[in-house]
DNA sequence: ATTTAGAATTAGAATGATTCTAACTGCATT
DNA sequence: AATGCAGTTAGAATCATTCTAATTCTAAAT
């Protein structure tokens, strides 16, 4: 599918607001928008393959390579986040708010958790003077309440 | 190389202390011990391949498969930790103290950082009631002081 | 001392996720 | 119409890891 819209289009959406806030020069093709929309509508931190399957309902001929390209583009422009919880597939997340990931080792589910108060992990741990922090990535592994109740 | 020692051997070492504390039933073959020793002597969170290269000086014929087997054995018995900082290779760490990892995005260096005070991340983030936490994994990404000074 | 069973080790094949490559397509400008 | 360029594509290539089947060694049983 070729690009049919160039810069941020006029249609209003969460994505457009996000673009406006970032002020980024993000060229949004239909595929990139679809990939973003699928991810924004997902709460399960899908993998690239999951996203491919979901985008296919709208664009049956999209390829996995294109999904990877779109995800890379969106990630590098700060529109989505890449999450590594375990070895194997990377997962993606459209929640840009400060949050951490809880990963259930029993059912594999991933849930976002938000801090109870402001907290600066970089300051909390004794990092050497002069260290610059760009982002932190906290994964909490365990058993979710549903799985814990079953056992 | 076949196993020549069965249970924890008599020779005293950090590893043996660790074994005693864990009370684990860990069968230590020479290769497993070498892999552990190499990791314990490293502060750079080596990958499986790094470890292979270092163990080779003592056991020139060891294979990567054996290194993976040893690492898996040591990890599953709680003697070492597996760290995923980015996509690609897994890294290993013999520091079992509560700590987080700082990853320099410029030079790739990984340094351990220890908390300034007691802190329970699981309690801090609003996890649903009934959630059980087995371990947390905090990665802080940024630029280390050395790289920051250069730019 | 031999046999047997079981675990460790090995090389190499297989797998799985991601990235690369080269060709193709269509919009936008010349 | 021609050109250039970014996006897209299929398929190949790569890379880390895991699997498989054969081999080797240890320890227990005979």
Image (tube, coloured by chain):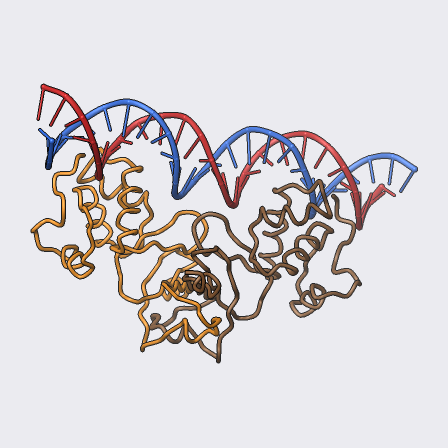
Chain colours: A orange, B brown, C blue, D red
Query: Extreme bottom residue here?
Result: B117
Residue A79 located left or right of residue C5: left
Q: How many marks?
A: 0
Residue B149, placed above or below residue A71: below
Residue B121, placed above or below residue B32: below
Q: Residue at x 66, y 56 (%)?
A: B36
Q: Is residue A141 visible?
A: no
Between A3 and A35, the one lying in front of the other is A3
Between A42 and B64, the one lying in front of the other is B64
Residue B53, placed above or below residue A124: above
Q: Position of residue B30 (x, y in %)?
A: 74, 51
Residue B133 located left or right of residue B8: left
Q: Residue at x 31, y 52 (%)?
A: A92
Residue B99 located left or right of residue A150: right
Between B14 and B74, the one lying in front of the other is B14
Location of residue B95 by image quarter: bottom right
Residue A135 located left or right of residue B133: left
Q: Residue at x 75, y 44 (%)?
A: B2
Q: Residue at x 56, y 60 (%)?
A: B81
Q: Is residue A73 visible?
A: yes
Q: Position of residue B115 (x, y in %)?
A: 49, 75
Location of residue A110 by image quarter: bottom left
For the N terminus of chain B, the image quarter is: top right
Location of residue D23 by image quarter: top right
For the C terminus of chain B, the image quarter is: bottom left
Q: Position of residue A146 (x, y in %)?
A: 36, 63
Q: Position of residue B128 (x, y in %)?
A: 34, 70
């Amino acid at each position: 599918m070729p690009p049919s819209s160039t810069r941020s289009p006029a249609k209003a959406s969460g994505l457009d607001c996000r673009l406006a806030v970032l002020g980024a020069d993000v060229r949004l093709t239909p595929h990139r928008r679809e990939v973003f929309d699928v991810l924004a509508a997902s709460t399960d931190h899908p993998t690239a393959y999951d996203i491919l399957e979901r985008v296919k309902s709208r664009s049956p001929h999209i390829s996995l390579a294109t999904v990877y390209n779109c995800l890379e583009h969106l990630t590098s422009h700060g529109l989505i986040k890449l999450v590594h919880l375990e070895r194997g597939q990377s997962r993606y997340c459209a929640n840009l708010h400060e949050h951490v990931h809880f990963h259930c080792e029993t059912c594999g589910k991933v849930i976002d958790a938000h801090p109870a108060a402001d907290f600066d992990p970089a300051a909390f741990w004794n990092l050497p003077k002069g260290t610059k922090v760009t982002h932190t990535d906290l994964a909490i592994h365990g058993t979710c309440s549903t799985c814990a109740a079953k056992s």
